[in-house]
Amino acid sequence: MSQLILPAVVLAAEGTAVTMRMVRASMLEQLNQEFVRTLRAKGLPEWQIVGRHVLRNALIPVISLTGLRLGWIVGYTLIVETIFQWPGVGFLLVDSVLRRDYPVAQFFALLLVFFVVSANWLAEIGYGLANPRIRRA
């Protein structure tokens, strides 16, 4: 179990930093909108404004980024498998291309494409959960 700590940190570090910066920028952008001023004028507590209204609107770009990042993580696992000398799907894909084993390479390439398409589909579902107006449109 301890051998999984360093690869997990390697895969999560870059993505976490980018996602946190996106959340911060999106939250700051939403806090300057007119509806936030209106909610404050109505007398709503700040935690309710930020938690219920601003965060839901700020999640839309973050969901887009997350859908893309899930596809990128598949590519990063190839690098992690190479660095840590783990035999995995990425290593098998590169090995099959180098050995010119095309059926195996095509299968794993198709598997990666399926994973990326599924990640984007999950992001579309996330849009509807974060903002119900998108679901109706």
Image (cartoon, rainbow, N blue to C red):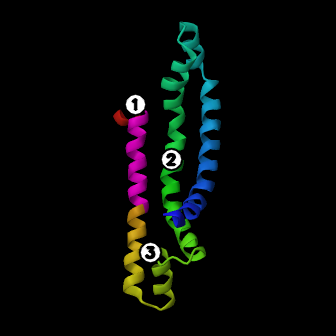
Q: What residue type is labelled 1?
A: Arg
Q: Which secondary structure type mostly characterizes the magenta part of the structure?
A: helix
> Alpha-carbon neighbours of circle 2 within 10 Å: few (<14), some, or many (≥20)?
some
125 falls in the magenta region: yes
For the C terminus, the quadrant is: top left
| Picture coordinates of residue 109, whole percent (x, y) | 42, 74
Q: In this view, does 53 lie above or below 126?
A: above
Tag in front: 3 or 2: 3
Residue farthest along the left direction in this orientation: 136
Q: Quadrant of residue 8?
A: bottom right
The residue sitting at 52% across, 68% down in the picture is 77
Report the residue marked by disc 2.
64
The residue sitting at 43% across, 68% down in the picture is 112
Report the residue marked by disc 3.
89
Lower sequence index among marks 2 and 1:
2
Q: Nearer the viewer, residue 80 or 51?
A: 80
Q: Give the range drawn in magenta.
A: 116-131
Tag in front: 3 or 1: 3
The residue sitting at 42% across, 55% down in the picture is 119
Lower sequence index among marks 3 and 1:
3
| Picture coordinates of residue 130, whole percent (x, y) | 43, 35
CA gap between label 3 and label 2 equals 26 Å
| Picture coordinates of residue 5, whole percent (x, y) | 55, 61
Q: What element carries label 3?
A: helix
Residue farthest along the bottom direction in this orientation: 99
Lower sequence index among marks 3 and 2:
2
Image side of residue 137 versus residue 65, left or right: left
Q: What element carries label 1?
A: helix
The residue sitting at 43% across, 32% down in the picture is 131
Q: Is residue 14 above or below residue 4?
A: above
Q: What residue type is labelled 2?
A: Ser
Q: What element carries label 2?
A: helix
